[in-house]
Image: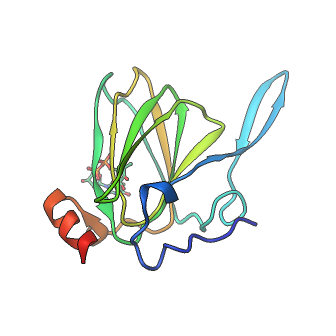
Amino acid sequence: MMEPTTARAAGHASVDDCRVIPLRTVEDPRGSLTIVEGELDIPFPIERVYHLHGVPAGGRRGGHAHRHLEQILIAVAGAFDVLLDDGVARRRVRLDDPRTGLHISPGVWRELESFTDGAVCVVLASMPYADDDYERDYEEFLNWRSR
Ligand code: T46
């Protein structure tokens, strides 16, 4: 059982709280099978799954923070960069391995960029979709983080 995120309630995590998690993978001559069970392999129950695909090579997504939502991003095909920003520090993570997932804590700004052709990003999310959980304005994000 994975420990729940302590920063979850506060929503004021740092970029260093965002970790690349190795995912359980079964390898055999037929190929590989990677497993994610909520609260076992990742630190939250999975309420929603979506995937980004058909992103043009070099394309970008994201450009926002979530106040409460936490997520795991997995590059199940291809690769892309995730730029993380907590209002003080920034960190860039390249995702290119379907056996790992990037845990993004609440309150961290993210930009996805440098997609390779054919890349697919699967996202495991801790909450249903809620537009009012998004902070899409960077200046407002900085104000919120500094409070
Ligand atoms: C994130 C990155 C990695 C829905 O109706 N339901 C959903 O569950 C989602 C995720 C999106 N939408 C709608 C809202 C917009 O009209 O789909 C449209 C595109 O969403 P957005 O511009 O937010 O897409 P991205 O790729 O910039 O961001 C998405 C997630 O929204 C976000 O949580 O972290 O992927």
* Residue 137 shows in the view: no
| Residue 52 pos. (x, y %) | 40, 40
| Residue 118 pos. (x, y %) | 43, 23
| 67 relative to 90, above or below | below
Which residue sits furthest front?
Answer: 88
Q: Residue at x 42, y 78 (%)?
A: 10
| 147 relative to 16, above or below | below
Q: Residue at x 40, y 34 (%)?
A: 81
- Most foreground residue, 45 or 135: 135
In the image, taking residue 18 as reference, residue 86 lies left or right, namely left
* Residue 134 shows in the view: yes
In the image, taking residue 52 as reference, residue 147 lies left or right, namely left
- Most foreground residue, 34 or 43: 43
Q: Quadrant of residue 65?
A: bottom left
Which image quarter is the C terminus in? Answer: bottom left
- Most foreground residue, 5 or 50: 5
| 45 relative to 94, above or below | below
Q: Residue at x 34, y 59 (%)?
A: 86
Q: Quadrant of residue 15?
A: bottom left
| Residue 34 pos. (x, y %) | 71, 41
Which residue sits furthest right?
Answer: 28
Applied colour scheme: rainbow
Tell me how many marks there are.
Answer: 0
Which image quarter is the N terminus in? Answer: bottom right
| 87 relative to 117, above or below | below
| Residue 79 pos. (x, y %) | 47, 28
